[in-house]
Image: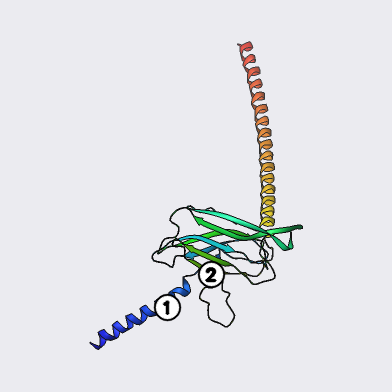
Amino acid sequence: MKASRIAAAGAVAASAVLALSAPAFAHVSVQPEGTAAKGDYATVNFKVPNERDDASTTKLEVNFPTDHPLASVMPQPIDGWSVKVTESKLAKPLTLHGEKIDEAVTKVTWTASGKGIEPGFFQKFPLSIGALPEDTDELVFKAVQTYSNKEVVRWIEPQKEGEEEPENPAPVLALSAASETGHHGSAATADASDAKDTAQDTTEAASSSDSSDTTARVLGVVGIVVGAAGVAYGVLAGRRRTNA
């Protein structure tokens, strides 16, 4: 009896812990595919779980930080969802690759054209963004999740250092240190590789040409020898007929 009661109490306690901890993990978050290096471009996914048992998520709005605006934001098409990218004028224009940019993306909105994210499921919303700022370690986004029953959940609360996670935390993208080559490194590597391939092709072509020339010369010499042998055979044959 004591053992069964202890086991039952343990199960109840475990269920309570899971129930209390679940909301902390079931919020809108953002993670990069690979790394999100400062000064580079990255593909990121906004992960949206459905927290309701009786409604589907039908809309997601992601607001971009205005203190670190991004000049390039491109969404990836998702079946069953339409997407709208909103741009706004910048109070302080950006200079990117020598060009002045006075507009940046301030919001991306996904709207379900079907059932949306049903209970018990989650959805990833991918974006290609850049160039990432070099003067901060993270980007804080504000997300608004709308359900089919018209309920709206605002994931907009910043995480304060030394404090517990807020009830509705804003998605935060951590930025890694800038790479040595930056986003130009891949292009430089590709150019070097192309140059190497071109040089190799040229060498192979030259080698093939030399081989062809050598083969032609050998065949020429063989032809001359065969021809001379034929002439000699003809002369000898003529002499034999005369003697006969």
Q: Residue furthest bottom?
A: 2
Q: Is residue 41 above or below residue 10?
A: above
Q: Name the residue located 64 percent from the left edge and 14 percent from the top edge.
A: 238
Q: In what element is the residue under mark 2?
A: strand
Give the x, y percent position of residue 97: 74, 58
- Taking depth in this image into account, of 59 and 64 the one nearest to the observer is 59
The image quadrant of residue 216 is top right
Q: How is the image coloured?
A: rainbow
- Taking depth in this image into account, of 8 and 28 the one nearest to the observer is 28
* Residue 101 in sight: yes
Give the x, y percent position of residue 205: 67, 42
Q: Residue furthest left?
A: 1
Q: Is residue 76 above or below residue 27?
A: above
- Mark 2 surroundings within 10 Å by alpha-carbon count, few (fewer than 14), some (14 through 19), many (20 or more): many
- Horizontally, is 6 left or right of 130 in the view? left
* Residue 97 in sight: no
The image quadrant of residue 239 is top right
Q: Are marks 2 and 1 in contact (CB under 8 Å)?
A: no
Quadrant containing the C terminus is top right
Residue beneath disc 1: 20
- Labelled disc at residue 36: none
Identify residue type, mark 1.
Leu
- Labelled disc at residue 155: 2
Give the x, y percent position of residue 101: 73, 58
- Mark 1 surroundings within 10 Å by alpha-carbon count, few (fewer than 14), some (14 through 19), many (20 or more): few
The alpha-carbon separation of the residues under discs 2 and 1 comes to 18 Å
Mark 2 or mark 1, which has the lower sequence index? 1
Q: Name the residue located 46 percent from the left edge and 70 percent from the top edge.
A: 26
Looking at the image, is mark 2 or mark 1 nearer the viewer? 2
Q: In what element is the residue under mark 1?
A: helix
